[in-house]
Image (cartoon, grey):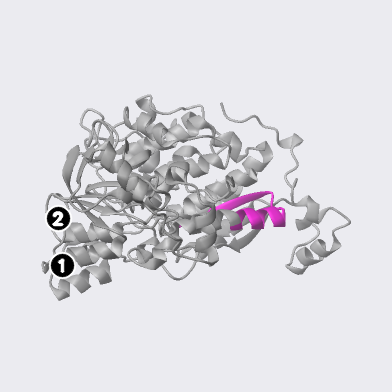
Amino acid sequence: MSAPDTTEAIELNRYSKTFTQDPTQPAAQAMLYGIGLTDDDMQKPQVGVASMGYDGNTCNMHLNDLAKIIKQGIWDAEMVGLIFHTIGVSDGMSNGTEGMRYSLVSRDIIADSIEAVVGAQYYDGVITLPGCDKNMPGSIMAMGRLNRPSIMVYGGTIKPGHWKGEDLNIVSAFEALGQKMAGTISPEDFMGVIKNACPSAGACGGIYTANTMAAAIEALGMSLPYSSSNPALSEEKKAECLAAGKAIKILLAKDIKPTDIMTREAFENAIVVIMVLGGSTNAVLHLIAMAKSVGIKITQDDFQAVSNRIPVLADMKPSGKYMMEDLHKVGGVPAVMKYCWDQGWLHGHCLTVTGKTIAENLQEIPSINFDTQKIILPVENPIKATGHLQILYGNLAEGGSVAKITGKEGTSFEGPARVFDGEFELIHGIQSGRVEKGDVVVIRNVGPKGAPGMPEMLKPTSAIFGAGLGSSVALITDGRFSGGTHGFVVGHITPEAYDGGGIAFVKDNDRIFIDAINRTINVMISDEEFAARKAAWVKPALKVTKGVLYRYAKTVTSAAEGCVTDEME
């Protein structure tokens, strides 16, 4: 049932009154009057609006405008709305460069900075406005740590681009590089793809990491219905922003906090929706980290348990046909959740930021019409009968690894290893013809500590596909994959090479066998040879000696533990 109405018993300004009502805080009050607050305003609750807006990428370029609408909605609800900002790193831009090392790091910086501002400023609640991939989990991690009424308003998805009658998205630009290497695209078409792949504001348009995390967080209960599928520039997104103020006032009045919403069952709901949509591998480490922020233990094996029983039903990019905007047109994520609820796959009693339960939210949601759309398929005709995320173990991944197997790639792969210490070596290897059909490409020393920062391998996988090798090679790594990656790929290999994991001992031409049915990943050498290589291995020096990457490498946990930085030994 929805939370009881305790409006009369709750002080809505329970935190901000530390500044506004305490006579020993005259300097704080002077500053608040200085920003324009009135005597009446000093009695109101204060809600921070954390915008991740900045001019430098399409995912985030519109967020500061949306933040102003959220602020207006807060004031309309007779509260004080105050905008502040935190950082963002563009995964789409930094992929394939040394800058990508900062992407996952930015998730924890975002969490730290939101926690710091809301904690220091005594805001009674917070509404976050994320765009690009790491913005979402960073927001939720901060909310969990603070445990004050909170709502995430997703910035929304981009529209598809177009070139010569073909729909485009950000992955089209990456794959055009591989086509250029292979000589299969003209200079005109190469530039045509690049100039038209991102036609407007909004996050990358398939069920890539940003849209995966937005959908998962909506299913978790931490954003309003339709938040994940309302397009960035739509009137629906503006209306959602305006409604967020009224919604958070309900949370304040009922004292509904993130720990009331983010329960173990709520995380299971999120994992179910990730599986049904065919979402990104990044969701695994992000949900593990998000759960830790509220003291809940979620493991890779929890994803496997859901994957064993939940099918993939969404025919969405990168492995399918459709974009998030297409899903919006047929009912969005609420319609998907309604179908999941009808199948008995969701915990309907879980509370959400509407102040109501999942089941209550879904009561009035129209059901999916399978006769008029082909984006979401019925359980009787799934894309894949079980989940696409598989957790593999073996001598290459004693601590586990995450494979993305949609079924189109097959369920097993065996071939000779082609070993590259970093993605840039692989790009040169593709250009020089070193990678051939049947190979298992190994990219190592790109883990949380080894890179450091565990960058995504989107440029290598896109180059492989563009070169015409996508269906005939496998790729394994101790790094991550973009949500835009498709093909036979295994990432998050733990322990990573830097920590002496099995991937550190692989040599060119070793046979590697990946079995998604039995969930194993092994290099086919004797135990004696494996032990000898391990004994001869020497731990490398860190690649950095100062700054945020050095601090990250010194504090980060493994991918299997969510790559968090606030668990000191």
- x, y percentage for residue 222? 52, 42
- Horizontally, is 503 left or right of 88 in the view? left
Foreground residue, 475 or 117? 475
The C terminus, quarter of image: top right
Q: Which residue is mark 2?
A: 469
Residue 465's image quarter? Answer: bottom left
Foreground residue, 252 or 103? 103
Q: Which residue is farthest right?
A: 23
- x, y percentage for residue 491? 33, 47
Between circles 1 and 2, the one closer to the viewer is 1
**Looking at the image, is 263 positioned above or below residue 468?**
above
In the image, the segment drawn in magenta is 113-131
Label 1, secondary structure: give it. loop
The N terminus, quarter of image: top right
Magenta stretch holds residue 114: yes
Label 2, secondary structure: give it. loop
Please, what is the three-letter code of the amino acid marked with disc 1?
Ser
Q: Residues within 10 Å of mark 1 (few under 14, many from 20)?
A: few
